[in-house]
């Protein structure tokens, strides 16, 4: 098995797939938002058990989703 092929031995690169990245980011952000609602409902129990950081993790997921949407819009 060779790890390198000469240019005349290579197959042509396939065409890139057309995807809707915006939909994927929106679904991911919606999941984080749903999880945030769930953690806010159980906030007192989470804080008592030392898992209050879960709330901030969900908020960070939403924030990164918004940044991803802005990035995709500008791209």
Image (tube, rainbow, N blue to C red):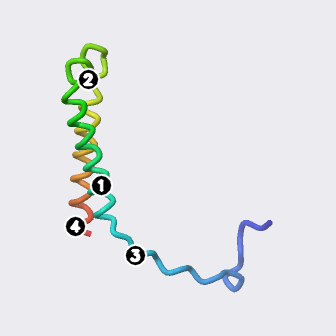
According to the image, label 1 marks what residue? 27
Query: Which residue lies under the disc numbered 3?
Result: 18
Residue lying at 23% horizontally and 59% vertically, measured from the top left: 69
Q: Report how far apart the C-alphas of labels 4 and 2 lie in the structure.
A: 33 Å
Res. 55 image quadrant: top left
In the rendered view of the protein, which quadrant contains the C terminus? bottom left
Foreground residue among 71 and 33: 33
> Could you tell me how many numbered marks the image carries?
4
> What is the residue that sits farthest to the bottom in this orientation?
8
Give the CA distance from mark 1 to mark 2.
Answer: 24 Å
Contact between labelled residues 3 and 1, with CB atoms less than 8 Å apart: no
Residue 21 is situated, as x and y percent measured from the top left of the image, at 33, 65
**Drawn side of residue 22 relative to residue 44, left or right:** right
Badge 2 density bin: few <14, some 14–19, many ≥20, Cα 10 Å: some
- Give residue 73's mark: 4
Question: Do tag 1 and tag 4 residues touch (Cβ < 8 Å)?
Answer: no
């Amino acid at each position: 098995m060779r790890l390198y092929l000469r240019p005349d031995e290579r197959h042509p690169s396939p065409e890139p797939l057309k995807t809707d990245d915006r939909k994927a980011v929106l679904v991911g952000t919606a999941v984080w938002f749903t999880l945030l609602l769930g953690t806010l409902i159980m906030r007192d129990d989470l804080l008592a058990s030392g898992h209050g950081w879960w709330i901030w993790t969900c908020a960070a997921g939403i924030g990164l989703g918004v940044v991803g949407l802005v990035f995709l819009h500008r791209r």
